Image: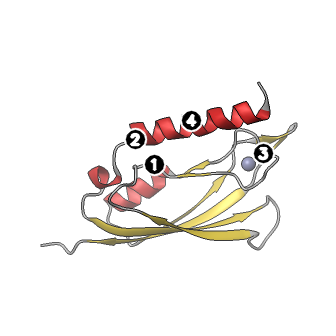
Amino acid sequence: MNRRGEAAERFAERRRREDEAPRLLEVAPDLVSCKIEIEERRAGVTGADVSHTRRVVVEHAPALFLVACGDPACRDGGHDITGDILRGLREHRAEIRGEDTCFGSTGSAECGRVIGYAAFAEYKPQV
Ligand SMILES: [Zn+2]
């Protein structure tokens, strides 16, 4: 299969997972807002290469948090931070921080790209 076909297939796979995932509000019904800051860096290099903020559209978002690998040479990589984020949201944490190492490969080597993430969440007041 050519690279374009592979990319299309990965995209379709991701769409399928997003469609099948429960909605975020089913998992965290009192969530009001959530944004996630993501820093990418190469293995063994200190200091962030890239950082960006992802604002989660709480009303529509699937309960699925996938971050694409920032290395264009990486194949089948990426970061699935769904488990940590959902756990934090269930515990009503205002801030959820963690790190994840890419599981993809670049040629014969492991990718090993690391992201650091920090999610900031707001919840409805408890009554
Ligand atoms: Zn990677």
Query: Which residue is rendered at x = 40% and y = 41% of the image?
Result: 21
Residue 98 found in image quarter = bottom right
> How does the figure colour the protein chain or chains?
secondary structure
Separation of disc 1 and disc 4 at Cα?
Answer: 15 Å
Q: Earlier in the sequence, mark 4 or mark 2?
A: 4
Separation of disc 3 and disc 4 at Cα?
Answer: 18 Å
Q: Residue 71, position in %: x, y?
A: 77, 53
Q: Amino acid at mark 1?
A: Leu
| Label disc, if present, on residue 64 of the rendered structure | 1
Q: Earlier in the sequence, mark 2 or mark 3?
A: 2
- Label 2 SS: loop
- Ligand 1 within 8 Å of the CB at mark 3: yes
Query: Which residue is rendered at x = 56% and y = 34% of the image?
Result: 13
Q: Earlier in the sequence, mark 3 or mark 1?
A: 1
Q: Is residue 113 left or right of residue 88?
A: right
Q: Amino acid at mark 3?
A: Cys
Count neighbours of disc 1 (C-alpha within 10 A) and say few if under 14, some if 14 to 19, many if 20 or more.
many
| Label disc, if present, on residue 12 of the rendered structure | 4
